[in-house]
Amino acid sequence: MLYLDGSSRKPEDALGYWVDKEDPKEISHLRFQSGYFSLSGLGAFAGIIKSLNTNSNKISAVIGANEKETIKDDVESYLDLVKSPRKGVNTAIVSFSNGLFHPKVYHLTRSDGSEIAYVGSANLTSFGINSGNIEAGLIVDTRKGDQKAILAKISASIDTWLGSTTIGSSVIKTNADVAKLVTDGIIGVAKTPRTSASGGAKSSTAKKPPLSPLLTFGPLLKKGKTTTAAPAGPTSSTSKTTAAPSAAHSLPGFVMTLQKTDVGVGQTSTGTSRRSPEIFVPLGARDMNPGFWSWPGAFVADAGWSGSIDQNGFGKMDRTNVRIRLGGTNTTMNMWYNPDKRDLRLRSEELRSSGSIGDILRIEKVSGAGYDYYIEIVPTGTTQHPVYLAKCVESVRAPSKKKFGYY
């Protein structure tokens, strides 16, 4: 038995560290139950899920829908990720009117019959798995001499919720099942920003130290896309070992179509102010390849922030004086995020003034060149515009016409 406590701020006390140590080829059944869930939390499990899908092995998931914090897009993306409906994949959403579904339990069965499980505080979110929060829990492993009866009880407790007659549990297999949960008011269509990580009020005068995740795993792509491979090992802020990059992290180029919100100036009437010079990058783009933006490691929490906190524990986050090369000139821009705006913003008057509606923003992350990003605007009507437009394969939720992609 092993006790993990994230207050140590050591990578080996994060659940994701131990998930990553398992050989995906040895896993024959993944079970989990989590009170809160986001697709980003599955990065550490990417290799295991890919192997289970390839070998048609079992995946059993029980996901809480507390106060509609679990959202439609994440559940649909999860079903797509595990190739549901297929034999061996079982998924249930659990919700109650007057209480929370609150367990955080993960169980792996290996092909040799041994079992390992975690029982603790870590939800299946990126901050839970990567210990961006202070988490604690126990790992039990029959290979280490822990009792098989305990592991059997843990796995059985998860399986109980997968019965079609279990009170509070809704078994789902398809997007039609997900749509019904939305109609029934069980899951939401968008995250509800919280005023603090605990749900209480946050004081603008409170001096609270920020936390950073101990690990960073490659993200999982949204539905309709293949999953990225899990890194060979986690990257940590305290470890000198650098993980092999995931497929998503190895893509150095980003493209996005520019809309009026990016290049417009807002009110032009006498006495009104111009809109702040900001390009709006969808959160889906940031989360698809956080390494490209150095998120969240290069960002600093705004100590004076008194607004919402997102589901991963982030308030307003700033990355200032980012070195860029734009139009043959070296300059800087700022990046920032806050949960109330629901996008990542690039603040630069030079950048905003360079583009027009329909142009394509092209950014390449570089190293050793004296700047962090090479940026150019690809205008409509040029021979390169259709080339880069073809790389903008990801859409943003309606009514936005914005598209983006990585290459």
Image: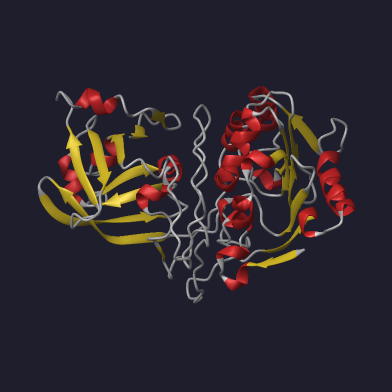
Give the camera-side residue of 302 and 326: 326
Does residue 269 show up? no
Question: Taking 262 as reference, is 98 left or right?
Answer: right
Can you give x and y, in whole percent of width and height, for residue 36 in the image? 66, 49
Question: Taking 103 as reference, is 366 left or right?
Answer: left
Please state, as top left, top right, bottom left or bottom right, where the N terminus lies in the image: bottom right
Question: Taking 357 as reference, is 252 left or right?
Answer: right
Give the camera-side residue of 102 and 249: 249
Residue farthest to the front? 112
Can you give x and y, in whole percent of width and height, for residue 223 in the image? 53, 30
Q: Is residue 215 above or below residue 362?
A: below
Please state, as top left, top right, bottom left or bottom right, where the C terminus lies in the image: top left
Give the camera-side residue of 347 and 226: 226
Can you give x and y, in whole percent of width and height, for residue 214 in the image? 53, 62
Q: Is residue 187 above or below residue 56?
A: below
Which residue is at a point 21% across and 44% down the rendered structure image?
375
**Residue 394 found in image quarter:** top left
